[in-house]
Image (cartoon, rainbow, N blue to C red):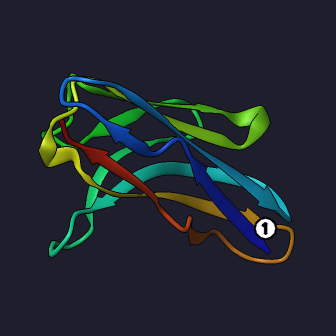
Amino acid sequence: QVQLVESGGGLVQPGGSLRLSCAASGSIFSINAMGWYRQAPGKQREYVATITSRGSTNYADSVKGRFTISRDNAKNTVYLQMNSLNSEDTAVYYCNAIVTTMTSVPSDYWGQGTQVTVSS
């Protein structure tokens, strides 16, 4: 019904930047909040940032001032600009969206994840 496809991950040196993208497709009627979560090796998945359909944003304390979430509602796409990356940002980053389809109530959808590795 709904697919979320992330892109933009990769290997970056400490202090560097990356921009993640996540495009939603399928039988979408509307998208409420979109966001990013991450999971480091041996750790639980943790919240990174969210953005509402009206553009209100929220961030985890660990990324405030370094990461910026944005979205293009016309493209059903959410972005995560990550600056000043450090080794603790190494993780698989997952896109999340609350989507109302043509035939269902708002539901949670997840992308497949994209690896971000910060290393020299």
Give whichever of 48, 52 is nearer the camera: 48
Give whichever of 48, 12 is nearer the camera: 12
Say which residue appears at 54% left-offset and 68% top-offset.
Answer: 112
Give, as a three-letter code, the residue at label 1: Thr
Say which residue appears at 13% left-offset and 47% top-offset.
Answer: 88
Name the residue that disc number 1 marks: 101
Percent from the top left, x then y, of residue 108?
55, 71
Looking at the image, residue 42 sits to the left or right of residue 37; the answer is: left
Looking at the image, residue 115 sits to the left or right of residue 45; the answer is: right
- Quarter of the view holding residue 120: top left
92 relative to 83, above or below? below
Percent from the top left, x then y, of residue 116?
35, 49
Q: Tell me if mark 1 has few (under 14), some (14-19) or many (20+) residues whose alpha carbon lies within 10 angstroms of its own.
A: some
Percent from the top left, x then y, of residue 77?
66, 41
44 relative to 30, above or below? below
115 relative to 108, above or below? above
